[in-house]
Image (tube, rainbow, N blue to C red):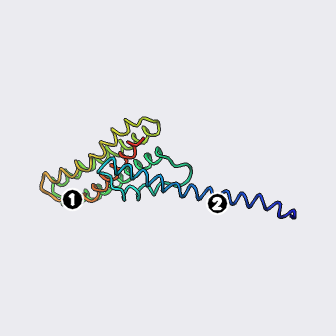
Amino acid sequence: MTTSNKMLLPLVFLILFQCSFSMTVTTALPGIIIDTCHRCEKADPNVNYTLCVASLASVPKSGQINLKKLAIASVEIAKANMTRAKSEVRKILKDETMNRYVKSCLETCRNLYSDCISTLADSIKAIKSGRYEDAKIWISSAVDAPGTCEDGFKEGSLKSPLTKDNGALFNLTAIALAVTSLL
């Protein structure tokens, strides 16, 4: 073996090790997501397995992924969607020709979303510090918010402009609660 070949041998092993390590992490990630979503679906009839897998698949694949990181990510996803829904309500409220009752319902929804954003942020901190029971209580309140928002419109016999958003918010917060409950 020549000197140049001897120098290349450790480099080849290093490249092979890095490739196999990268493939192991990448293939392990979907396994934990699939397992977690199956467990959540079995434990909670409100969890949509397909949405669970799709939302948790967005979790960054770098580093060691575990159930705690999935719980944090699921709450972050719910919080981001709650923030987006609140922004949508703000846009709708700019319509000055809006019926006062509809405006009142939308303001209630906006306030509910604001409270949930804060509560979900607190839940993330609680999960990070191992206070899982606190996190579950706070996430549970966020699970209820989309239904409460919809109820205001139903009481007035009106069609909610937020039904689609509230359905997604309910599903995402239900997933966050189910994943956190596995901790």
Between tags 2 and 1, which lies in front?
2
Q: Amino acid at mark 2?
A: Cys
Q: Which residue is mark 1?
A: 96
Depth order, front residue of 95/145: 145
Secondary structure state at the residue bearing disc 2: helix
Q: Amino acid at mark 1?
A: Glu
Q: Which residue is mark 2?
A: 19
Measured as percent of width and height from the top left, residue 135 is found at 38, 39
Image spot of residue 113 (x, y percent): 30, 48
| Residue at left offset 60%, top offset 57% | 22
Q: Quadrant of the C terminus?
A: top left
Helix, strand or loop for disc 1: loop
Q: Position of residue 60 (x, y in %)?
A: 51, 54
Residue under the image location 33 percent in, 47 percent down: 43
Q: Is residue 52 left or right of residue 26?
A: left
Q: Which quarter shows the N terminus?
A: bottom right
User: What crowding class fits label 2: few (fewer than 14 Cα within 10 Å), some (14-19), or many (20 or more)?
Assistant: few
Q: Which comes sooner in the sequence, label 2 or label 1? A: 2
Q: CA distance from mark 2 to mark 1?
A: 59 Å
Total label count? 2
- Residue 4 higher or lower than 43, as above or below: below
Question: How many other residues sit within 10 Å of disc 1, few (<14), some (14-19) or many (≥20)?
Answer: few
Indicate left or right for 63 with 94 as reference: right
The residue located at (35%, 40%) in the rendering is: 136
The correct choice, above or below, for 132 with respect to 25 in the image is: above
Q: Quadrant of residue 115?
A: top left
